[in-house]
Image (cartoon, rainbow, N blue to C red):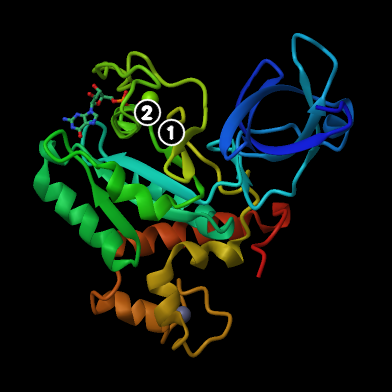
Amino acid sequence: MASEDTFRGVITKGVGGVYTVRFANDGGYEYALCAARGNIRLKGIKPAIGDRVTFMSSGDPDIPYVITDIEDRTSFISRPPVANLSVMLLTFSVTDPAPDLTLLDKMLLLCSINNIKPVIIFTKSDLNTDECERFCSVYTKAGYEVLVSSPQKVLTKNDLKDIIGDGIAAFAGPSGVGKSTLCNSLLGFDVMQTGEVSAKIRRGKHTTRHVELHEFFDGFICDTPGFTSLSLEDQGVDYRDVLYGYPEITALATGCRFDDCSHRKEDGCVIRNALADGLIDQGRYERYAGFYTELFDNRNNYKHRRKQ
Ligand SMILES: Nc1nc2c(ncn2[C@@H]2O[C@H](COP(=O)(O)OP(=O)(O)OP(=O)(O)O)[C@@H](O)[C@H]2O)c(=O)[nH]1
Ligand SMILES: [Mg+2]
Ligand SMILES: [Zn+2]
């Protein structure tokens, strides 16, 4: 190939400043090792997994290509650190560890703000089927897509084929919930090792530490390290956007007689009435009100709003 030729591809892996980029060639796919050109970093963007990039020959035999441009991202959130995510597989176990629904609701809100499709996967349903049904019911009623997985009925590739399509999907959730177990079983090989959960810290023995995209039908899936905390304020969420994480409240809120109602204390608010009538889940409502109050109290610090 002539040295001026440029190519386009997707970053699937990045280790120590060396990026693996998948590109189409001769009706199939190939992988190229790339460095990043200094001016990309000067623009303030560090290449990330999932980035669609332009690259060309570098003349360096060790790292034969160099990334010269990064396409605008459709989404980027730091947890997990994957660009252009189209689907987030929000994985929570029904027990061991018990699901942190505050974290789940925060992730659902961030997905909505960043136009990422959320799919909730409740794992370890074998350990408590009643609890599993209860969680599924809350989130199905709220309007979300919910899947269930257990060793007896593990999710199959076909369960996720249409959901992911030609997009990029990432498993995300706390440590020890079974993300690597699921990802490995979908791919048919061990991408990351899985381990017994230590009783003390509830973490896989071989906790996932790095992220890599793996081909999955026409798209990609990736495993990611577990995390426990997430700050909506640090993610730049505005209090007026909290409703984006609560479609079931939004649907009823159009009937509220106050245009700027926060649905927390106002008398005659339809949401408060719906709550009293049991039409909205109490826990979901409390988390909505909690996030709203916290972000409202810190409202001078917010950075951006959802793109309309
Ligand atoms: N009973 C039961 N155990 C499961 C299930 N899924 C995973 N496990 C077990 O849970 C433990 C943790 O699984 P991992 O796949 O390592 O969890 P992880 O989410 O990747 O954890 P991190 O990499 O630390 O974020 C392992 O011992 C798995 O065998 C399930 O559906 N039922
Ligand atoms: Mg893991
Ligand atoms: Zn209201």
Is residue 22 depicted above or below 258 in this figure? Answer: above
Residue ID for mark 1: 228
Q: Kindly identify the amino acid type of the residue bearing the numbered disc 2.
A: Ser
Q: Kindly identify the amino acid type of the residue bearing the numbered disc 1.
A: Thr
Lower sequence index among marks 2 and 1: 2
Residues 205 and 202: in front is: 205
Q: Quadrant of residue 137?
A: bottom left
Q: Check if mark 2's residue and mark 1's residue have beta carbons within 8 Å.
A: yes
Work out which quarter of the rendered image holds the N terminus and state it.
top right
Image disc number at residue 175: 2
Residue occupying the point 33% across, 23% down: 189
Residue 201: image x %, image y %? 32, 19
Q: Is residue 169 visible?
A: no
Is residue 116 depicted above or below 100 in this figure? Answer: below
Residue occupying the point 24% across, 42% down: 155
Q: Is mark 2 within 8 Å of ligand 1?
A: yes
Residue 5: image x %, image y %? 84, 34
Q: Is mark 1 within 8 Å of ligand 1?
A: no
